[in-house]
Image (spheres, rainbow, N blue to C red):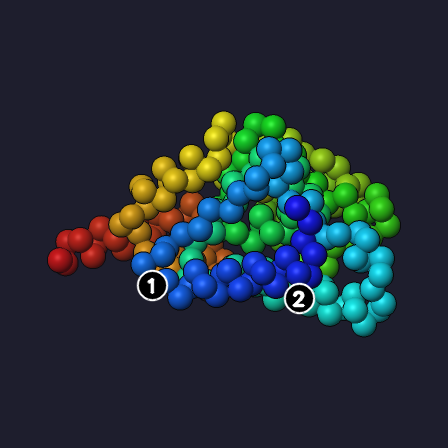
Amino acid sequence: MTLRRAVLATLADAVTSWEARPHLRWVACAADSPTTFLAGADFRELGALDAEGAHAFSAMGQAFLRRLSESRLWFVACVEGACMGGGLDFALNCDYRIASPSAAFSHPGPKLGLFTGWGGTAILPRRGAGAQGDLLSGRQRTARQALAAGWIEEVAARPLARAVTRARSSSRLDLARLKRLRRAERLPLSVALEYERLLALEGEGDA
């Protein structure tokens, strides 16, 4: 699937409907295809845009991905197959990333003479060493390489099933509070998660 404007609008409406369900805490994002998680923007749609339209499309994508990162919901990217360009931006703005061993990640834009405008090129350098070279070369990383580079949190044979297991084990955690903590303090997930677990234990002790 490509992230066309119509797809972005549909996804934004879906987030709004999910947020309206007070008992919903997390959302697993997976693709129907085992070969492609998200392929980014549709180049045919991009080619038809003028300068004003391209700016508006970039702003639309950034606004949607900001919705993901600022939502009270916990989004888990369950990546199988290719996760490229804007698709990688999408995964990076989720709260947790689980990839199958066959997954592949890259920002191929430089090879095509373009850079994505949805924020991934700013996020990746903050996640680990070597990202600048990957961005400039459009180099592709395997799931294991992405894990070592800090782009994802887990590699699992069945990412969606693993996400469900993770969700069940997090039932005592305040995921919305965890997200706020990470944004406010810019903490690594492991540090913020440990702090949230301590808060949860304190809450149980006060009960």
Q: Quick one: SS at disc 2?
A: helix
Q: Is residue 93 shown left or right of residue 17?
A: right
Report the side of 40 relative to 187 (left or right): right
Q: Residue 92: image x %, image y %? A: 58, 50
Q: Quadrant of residue 180?
A: bottom left
| Mark 1 element type | loop
Q: How crowded is mark 2: few (under 14 residues within 10 Å), some or many (20 or more)?
A: some
**Residue 97: x %, y % from top left:** 51, 43
Q: Label 2 sits on what residue type? A: Met
Give the amino acid at mark 1.
Pro
Residue 24, image quadrant: bottom left
Residue at image location 61% in from the left, 63% down from the top? 9
Seen in the picture, residue 100 relative to 90 is either above or below; the reply is above
At 44% from the left edge and 51% from the top edge, which residue is drawn? 27
Quarter-of-image position of residue 181:
bottom left
Taking the image as shown, residue 179 lies to the left or right of residue 33, namely left
Q: Residue 108 carries which label?
A: none
Any part of residue 126 in sight: no
Left or right: residue 163 compared with residue 52: left
Q: Residue 22 carries which label?
A: 1
Q: Mark 2 points at which residue?
A: 60
112 and 134: which one is in front?
A: 112
Cα distance, mark 2 to mark 1? 26 Å
How far across and how far down the image is residue 38, in percent? 64, 45
Name the residue at the bottom extreme. Answer: 52
